[in-house]
Amino acid sequence: ALARRIDRPIVLVGMMGVGKSSVGKRLATLLDCPFVDADDEIERSAQMTIPEIFETFGEDYFRNGERRVIARLIAESGAAKKRIVIATGGGAFVNAETRALILDKAITIWLDSEVDTLVERTARKDNRPLLRNGDPREILARLREERAPHYALAPIHVVSCSGPHVQTINKVLQEIS
Ligand code: S3P
């Protein structure tokens, strides 16, 4: 009976380090449907890591690939009439075309956290090219500020506090059930 009305892909948007992948994975388990991380999917289809894609081809190229991958994931789930949870990279929803596509076809959830939480969570892995050219805290604070108006276009907002993701997941479930 859990969230049985859900008939569209669930797409998580928001900043790097907010927990889109962790929350998405557990949400998918609870909803008994597949989870896909769009960043992983991009790396798989390019046979390169995200830092390598940025270094070799630049950010614009990455954004194009990102849009195509997200479009494909959404289309596949629609064609199969299958539920899916998709975690997007932090910049995906800032791209106007990618955003339009997501808003049109998916249940979109903006996960937001304080900058401190983003700093803490992004420090666990050095796989984010945008955080390599300066002080991660400054970069995260600036991007969060710049991107907030875009993220705010998502119909559902959930605040993710530091600490375990269980509260965030419960809030998300409440919003979509
Ligand atoms: C990016 C976020 C990353 C990844 C790339 C660019 C961004 O994904 O797509 O490094 O522009 O915010 P996560 O949000 O999963 O870290």
Image (spheres, helix red, strand yellow):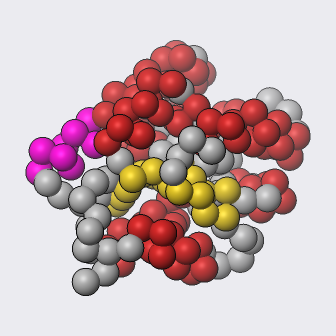
In the picture, measured across the screen, residue 84 lies left or right of residue 26, that is left
Which quadrant would residue 6 be assigned to in this image?
bottom left
- Foreground residue among 23 and 49: 23
Q: Which segment did they paint magenta?
A: 72-80
Q: For the N terminus, which image quadrant?
A: bottom left
Residue ID at (57%, 80%): 166
As drawn, 170 above or below 63? below
Residue ID at (80%, 30%): 133
- Foreground residue among 91 and 65: 91
Residue ID at (58%, 31%): 94
Residue 45 shows in this picture: no
Magenta segment includes 151: no
Residue 47: x and y in percent read: 37, 33
Q: How many marks?
A: 0
Residue projecting furthest to the left: 80
Q: For the C terminus, which image quadrant?
A: bottom left
Q: Main secondary structure of the magenta part?
A: helix
Which quadrant would residue 152 be assigned to in this image?
top right
